[in-house]
Image (spheres, rainbow, N blue to C red):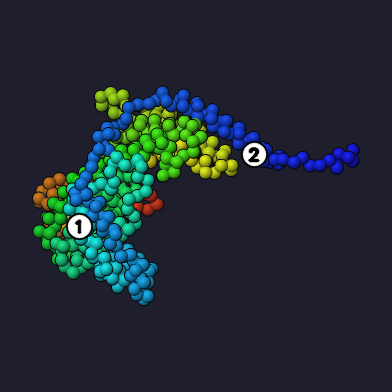
Amino acid sequence: MSDLHTLPTPTGVPARSRRRRAVGTVILVAIACAGFWAYRQFTTLEIPEPFDVEGYTSYTLPDEQNAFTYYRRGAEKLVSEEEVFAGNPLFKREEFWESWNVAAEQGWDHAVPSLRQWLKLNRPLLAELNRGADCAESLEFPLGEAATANALSVNWGTLRACFQLQTLEGLRLTAEHHPAAAWDCFRNTLRSSRHLAMHASGIETMFGMAIGDQAARSAVIWAADPSVGPTDLRRAIQDLLAVEKMRAPASDQIKLEYLALRAYSEKGTIDGTPTRSWVRATGYPTQIGLCARMVIANLLTQADRPKYQRTAVHPGELHLFELDPAAPHDPKLLPPQEIEAAAANSANTLAHALRPILPDAAQQLEYCNPPFLLGLLWQASLWRDASQAHRSALLLALALELYYREHHEFPATLEDLVANGELKSIPLDPFGAGERYHYRTATPTARGATLWSVYTDGIDDGGADMRHGKGDLVLRVPDPGTNNQP
């Protein structure tokens, strides 16, 4: 018995490593079986392209007519805030950014010397932004290259700083009582915000929405300035109505996102990274493409309609619309419950099992979960509604300031703006059920007037500001000549 304890230890692969390899082999076999099952299950759900892809991608725009041509040139001329700090060691970064936030909300008088210097150094780039704003259309890159344009063609942080400077210039001109030139800055930024949402992905659309929102709030400060007269306000109203007609529908974003999903399905490349061949062999990337066709076809039926004219949203991870019973039959449209069922797979389960052994492969498998890549496409309509809400609020604010100039008080109701000729009609609340924008005049605790949208939850909270995800989208309209914070 004692001789057994002197036997040499076997050489070769340790038992733990052999067990790990065995488990890995079992998992890979399971993946292969799941891939074969997925292939058999989902290739039967193929439908035609959800829109005319060839016609959409053939759209081109000459450089001289493309707003993005000039926005790129402007971005190349930007003098960063770091160069301002390097030129004067007394300038403080915290003071600079705090001043920017306060000045953007309350006016140029709150701008500290470092912020004023930054604007002064960057005035040359504003000419390029103005040229871009005068264009009717914008295209970041040829749509035929959209599926392969993995890297953004412009630094969006830099571009956003350019438009922030344009808004600051408008606030400076407002404080120095140059109302016409100041409005030009706000008008051009609002036009640029529409340009950034043309043929644009979700991130571009959000950037456009952000700069448009800031321009709208700063334009309210402009409208309350004593130097702004009725003629200025009438011109601003007409300009804003023209901005509203600029084409940037939610369907544009959805179509562009589809091109990227289509390329992933066909070529197995996402964000510029090729997917491993064995991952593609599972059939999951192919499933993404097939599901994308069904999801996009569904979303395109409703995306560009006003919210109150859309059908109900089907419960599920993809936020699909219920089929319109009044619409003619379309072979591309499947019931939302069938699409949700087709989008189910075990990619996340397999990814979880593989994560301790092959973390990179596990991450690629997580991309193969249809709700992960398709579950946010519905938000294109959300961004459309939010941008609409900001522009409608600004339009009403301009009309209210015009009414005040002529009657020395705000109207009792928004309908008085139509009766008095400031507007031809009152905008609807984009998030409502077909009702007009909400409004009230001054209260004992708040001067000026208040405009609000019920916002994403569709619940009218009486003009209560957003708190913890609840409340309304509110715009305060100050009395002319006051510094009420809008």
Q: How many marks?
A: 2
Residue 130 disc label? 1
Query: Residue, x 32% and y 58% (percent of image)?
Result: 158
Can the viewer see residue 23 in this picture? yes
Q: Is residue 186 left or right of residue 148?
A: left
Find residue 366 and report its horizontal and vertical position in percent: 48, 40
Residue 158 disc label? none
Q: Earlier in the sequence, mark 1 or mark 2?
A: 2
Task: Say which element carries label 2.
Answer: helix
Foreground residue among 66 and 476: 66
Find residue 204 and report its horizontal and vertical position in percent: 32, 49
Based on the displayed image, in which of its 4 quarters is residue 429 positioned? top left
| Amino acid type at image mark 1 | Asn
Find residue 55 and report its horizontal and vertical position in percent: 25, 34
Rendered-image quadrant of the C terminus: bottom left
Height in image: 473 above or below 171? above
Residue 20 disc label? 2
* Residue neighbourhood size for the residue with mark 1, other residues' Cα within 10 Å, grouped as few (<14), some (14–19), many (≥20): many
| Residue occupying the far bottom of the picture | 90
Foreground residue among 443 and 301: 301
Height in image: 384 above or below 314? below
Task: Say which element carries label 1.
Answer: helix
Query: Residue, x 72% and y 40% (percent of image)?
Result: 12
| Amino acid type at image mark 2 | Arg
Can the viewer see residue 223 in this picture? no
Foreground residue among 179 and 119: 119
Query: Residue, x 24% and y 62% (percent of image)?
Result: 125
Q: Is residue 153 left or right of residue 238?
A: right
Q: Is residue 315 left or right of residue 66?
A: right
Height in image: 30 above or below 103? above
